[in-house]
Amino acid sequence: MADGEGSSSLRHGSEDLDPGEDQRDPPCSPSSSEGQTDPSTAPKETPPTSEAGEGRESTPVPEEEEDEEDTDSMDGSGLYSLTEEGERGSEGGRGGERQRRAKESEGRKRRRERERPGGGTTRGSSSSDEDEEEEEEEELDEEEDEQAMEAWLGAELRELAVPSWRAVPSLRAREIGRGAQFVKRVCGARGLVQRLELQARLERHTGCVNTLHFNPSGTRLASGSDDLRVVIWDWARRRAELEFDSGHKSNVFQAKFLPHSGDSTLAMCARDGQIRVAELSATQRCKNTKRVAQHKGAAHKLALEPDSPCSFLSAGEDAVVFGIDLRLDRPATKLVVVKEGDKKVGLYTIFVNPANTHHFAVGGRDQYVRIYDQRKINENDNNGVLKKFCPSHLVSSESKTNITCLVYSHDGTELLASYNDEDIYLFNSQHSDGADYCRRYKGHRNNATVKGVNFFGPCSEFVVSGSDCGHIYLWDKQSARVVQYMEGDKGGVVNCLEPHPHLPGLATSGLDHDVKLWAPTAETPTSLKGLKEVMKKNKRERDEDSVRHGDQYDTQLLWFLMRHMRHRRPQRTRRGEAGAGDGDTDESWSSADSSDEEETGADHVQCMSS
């Protein structure tokens, strides 16, 4: 949001509230604000709020006109009228207003208590007065709730910067040989993000699509699903090049191309805790899949090392992090068991620092982001943790907050963490142990599933996340303002978001059985119509659920179990048919085998062709 726009909104608010105005209709144009009286001459009964003060100190009108002429700015940039400083300054005014209303409400209650036994009023008139007072109190409560919601929406926001990219000048510079950074700047332009729209749906799976991953060149897209199958897409031609059985016994959670492997090696993990590797041939077929590690609980995420075609990490709900090297006869090595004190912390997510591959970050069933250094993990010294981050207000929180996903920025200097039924927080990974967050991104809902989050843009200019409301949100990283939101899933939940490695495009998936592709082809930028109402609805539902359920993880587990049981029988039928036809299922795996491998350590995990 430009300075002029924010000032305009605040001026309007001050004119409506200023009791020193003449008795006439409120002015409609910013220019009429010159006729306002000085706040010192206003009656003392209704002092002007801090918003009014900010409105008088606003920037001149010509700056606002200049910002409106900016063709690359978003139409909805004036959605919130409060900057971070303005919101903090206005808290005192709102607090005084709330105290005044609370005193009035208390006075009415006392009068009502005095009138109940009194003989001067009749029963009928007393009851009618009580009904009127209750209605007034309800209206006041609703008004206060609305003000509190507006304050929450406007808190911790910063000014939206003026767009740095212009289409015509950039094209002209490229034509004369000065456009070395053309593609990089285009892909990070806010104007293109605001023009994202649905391009195509890739339909092949028969279950929820839980994972998406582009190969390093961006020409192929891998997807994995609850139907236990993995599909390799030629996404540009909208067709599947290869489909194969993953070899897993339960929901496939992630499938990733290993870098510099010629797209011939795919690493996978699933709810059954297995870590498997698929070998793909140049003739578009899967040679085999083999198990290389086994977690005792579900394994949700893998972390690739950017330059290694044979090494990666895995994390499971058993709190174990495995380092896997495909060059070894026994590929899996247990790096660390994540603990808080003496208690194990089940893991949902892991990511390797792209600028320092010795460092990796994990998150799971508590509120802490933990960073480890593979070279010096000593579990007797702070449980091997190098650094630990957490939002300050969640450190002593009694609510059981989980981290569902975390990612490093393109240069490894920032960490993004998404909390269940909380917000998304940005940390500086270079800060010292215990540092607080730098930015906060809100408005979405993360409750029903283990939801993903990601950076968008070649220099991590934006933050993108799905939501239980079925929408996709994109925030400007620096200002924390929503610059784009789109309806992503008819099933109601968007879980996975995968930016293209080189183009300003995006692939998403969720409870729907398809993969959706998005590209910046809309003729006009988004208007963000209905965004504010959706964000308020998500916030209210989150607050209601936090009161209704003391343990959010229990509701999440119940939801997963119900969905798993619903799909379990059809999956077994399909796997039986696939096994009879292909003969490549791994029948040697069993739950007892899993337990033995976990207890005896990673050295006893064997590779078994499926």
Image (tube, grey):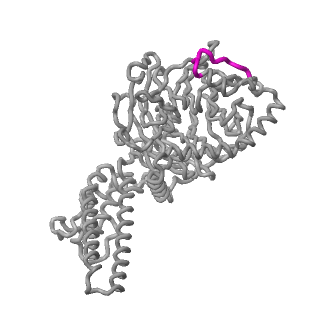
Figure check: 65 above or below 235: below
Residue furthest out toward the left: 40
Which quadrant holds the C terminus? top right
Viewer-side residue, 285 vs 361:
361
Is residue 132 left or right of 313 when viewed as pictured? left
Is residue 446 visible to the viewer in this orientation of the structure? yes
Viewer-side residue, 565 vs 513:
565
Is residue 509 visible to the viewer in this orientation of the structure? no
Q: Position of residue 312 (x, y in %)?
A: 57, 22
Instruction: Specify start and end residues of the magenta stretch as a single range.
Output: 598-609
Q: Position of residue 522 (x, y in %)?
A: 58, 51
Q: Position of residue 486 (x, y in %)?
A: 55, 51
Query: Quick check: is 602 in the magenta stretch?
Result: yes
Residue furthest out toward the right: 581
Figure check: 572 above or below 549: above
Residue beneath the point at 42% across and 29% down: 340
Is residue 335 left or right of 203 when viewed as pictured? left
Q: Position of residue 163 (x, y in %)?
A: 43, 45
Is residue 249 left or right of 160 when viewed as pictured? right
The image quarter containing residue 518 is top right
Residue beneath the point at 21% across and 71% down: 20
Query: Quick check: is 176 in the magenta stretch?
Result: no
The image quarter containing residue 68 is bottom left
Viewer-side residue, 426 vs 4:
426
Residue beneath the point at 78% across and 39% down: 573
